[in-house]
Amino acid sequence: MTNKGTRYFQIWERRGKALSVCVMLLSGTDQESKQSNSYRVSTTALYLFLIMHPSIISNSPSPKTFEEVQFFNRNNYHRGIDWYMDFFPIPSNVTTDFLFEKSANYFHSEEAPKRVASLIPKAKIITILIDPSDRAYSWYQHQRSHEDPAALKFSFYQLLIIDGQQLRTDPATVMDEVQKFLGVSPHYNYSEALTVLADLRPRATICCQISEKLG
Ligand SMILES: Nc1ncnc2c1ncn2[C@@H]1O[C@H](COP(=O)(O)OS(=O)(=O)O)[C@@H](OP(=O)(O)O)[C@H]1O
C-alpha cells in the first residue's frame, strides 16, 4: 500500500466507514480505443437495476464529470476520501453496507486498480463484457446519431467482422464469407485447398498444415 493509500485507509477507518463499496470497473472490449472502450456495454441498464434495490445506494451525480465521480482514475483522488464519500449521502433512515459507483474510464486507467486496492481492499468489482461485434455496431450507431464525421463517412455494410475463433476452426466457411463480402470472382474453393482440423491445435501446427496445402 502506498503512503497515501495507507493514510487514506486510516482516515477511512477513523470515520467508521467500514463499508463494502462496490466499484464498477466497466469494460467494453475495444481496448485500443482509449476514448470509447467502456461505453455502450449496458452500464445504464445495470446501474438502473442496482438502484432499484432498497439496500443498494449509488453516488450522487458529479456535475464536473458527466455524473460519474471519476475518483480513482484522475486527480480527484488527491482530494481525499472525504471528498469521495460526500458523493454518497446516505439518508438517516437507511442502513446499508452496499454503496457503488460506476465510472467508465476506470477500466483503462493504470492508476485506478492500484488505488482501489489501496483504499478499498475488499471492494467488489463488476465488469461487463459484451460481444465485440455487437459493441462495435452499437458504438457506430451511437456515433452516427451524434453526427461523428468518421462514422458518417462509412456504412456498416463496408465492414466485415470475422469471428477469429471460426477462422481457426472453419477457415473455408470464413473465406467464403470474405469472398462474398468482397464480391471477388471467380469463387475460390478453400474447402479443397485447406484441410484444418476443427479442434484447437497449436497455432504452429495449423499454420504448417495450411502452408503445406498451399505449397
Ligand atoms: N436491460 C438491458 N440489458 C442489457 N442491455 C441493455 C438493456 N437495456 C438497454 N440495453 C442496451 O445497452 C446499450 C447502451 O449501453 P450503455 O448504457 O452502457 O451506453 S452509454 O455508454 O451509457 O451510452 C444499448 O445497446 P444498443 O441498443 O445495442 O446500442 C441498449 O440497448
Image (cartoon, helix red, strand yellow):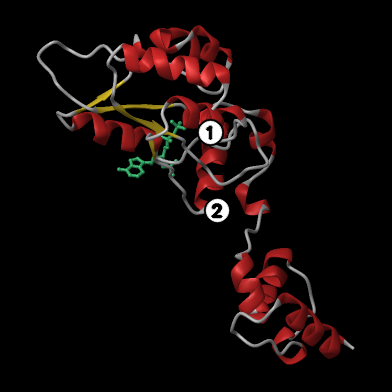
Where is residue 152, by image quadrant?
A: top right
Image quarter hosting the C terminus: bottom right
In this rendering, the count of numbered labels is: 2
Left or right of residue 50: residue 117: right
* Residue at position x 19%, y 31% in the image: 52
Q: Amino acid at mark 1?
A: Pro
Residue 112 drawn above or below residue 209: above
Q: Which residue is mark 1?
A: 113
* Residue at position x 72%, y 75% in the image: 203
Residue 7 image offset from top left, x and y in percent: 48, 15
Judging from the image, what secondary structure is the residue with disc 1 in? helix
Residue 99 image offset from top left, x and y in percent: 29, 26
| Ligand 1 positioned in quadrant | top left
Mark nearest the camera among 1 and 2 is 1
Q: Amino acid at mark 2?
A: Ser
Q: Which residue is mark 2?
A: 133
Q: CA distance from mark 1 to mark 2?
A: 27 Å
Q: Kindly tell me whether residue 106 is visible in this rendering.
A: yes
Left or right of residue 96: residue 188: right
Please, which residue is most extreme toward the right here? 215
* Residue at position x 39%, y 36% in the image: 43
Where is residue 173, by image quadrant?
A: bottom right
Q: Kindly tell me whether residue 68 is visible in this rendering.
A: no
